[in-house]
Amino acid sequence: METENKDIEHTLVIIKPDGISRSLTGNILAMLSHPESIIVGAKVVKVTREIAIAHYAHLKEKPFFDELIDYITGNWHANRVICLVYEGNDVIQRVRNIAGATNPEEALPNTIRGKYGRIHSKTGVFENTIHCSENKSEAEREIKLWFRPEEIVHNIYPVESKTDTLEHLYWK
Ligand code: IDP
Ligand code: MG
């Protein structure tokens, strides 16, 4: 029987609309690159209000919530993001360290947010170019929100098979 490695973690990274519109994708991916951080899922997503609100549900009482939803749905920048699932030992904390502090003014200059983040002068929202999960349970919640099992190269969480009646698009 295959033994499960309990130390292997997963984390969700989102290159936010400001990162996309300022052509920072390559720089961000290069900074996140590490031999023990393996990409197991990646896609470009046009962010709906519905998924944005679900993603940031824990912040809905914050004074900046509406502006945060405007930001992540791309009202000020590109209307898309890049979502990635990374796998590896300690990958959650390693990515958080490379991302830097939430407030770009407090983030160290050698971190992604320290290099590329800014505070939007009209709304005060921290435009910090990437999202990364905070802990294992948040990572699982977020990965399951943004990705279907088939979009990740192997089943990182238990899956079940269901037959549904949803219509899907196929190439003509
Ligand atoms: P995190 O992204 O570092 O985990 P969270 O507290 O989960 O930080 O906040 C989610 C996002 O909301 C941040 O990345 C940032 O874009 C924005 N944000 C958080 N706190 C503030 C704030 O005090 N002012 C403005 N924007 C904030
Ligand atoms: Mg967070």
Image (cartoon, grey):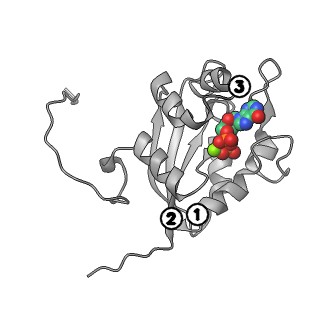
Q: Residues within 10 Å of mark 2 (few under 14, many from 20)?
A: many
Q: Amino acid at mark 2?
A: Glu
Q: Residues within 10 Å of mark 1 (few under 14, many from 20)?
A: many
Residue 151 or residue 28, whichever sits in front? 151
Indicate which label's residue lies in the foreground, 2 or 3. Answer: 3
Q: Are marks 1 and 3 in contact (CB under 8 Å)?
A: no
Give the farthest residue toward the front: 61
N-terminal of the pair, mark 2 or mark 1, is 2
Measured in 3D between alpha carbons, the distance from the residue under mark 2 to the one under mark 1, in whole angstroms, is: 6 Å
Q: Position of residue 144 (x, y in %)?
A: 40, 46
**Is there any visible trace of residue 127 in the rendered image?**
no
Judge from the rendering whether residue 50 lies leftward or rightward of residue 118; answer left or right. Answer: left
Q: Residues within 10 Å of mark 3 (few under 14, many from 20)?
A: some
Q: State the residue position of label 1.
A: 91
Q: Which secondary structure lies at badge 2?
A: strand
Q: State the residue position of label 3.
A: 64
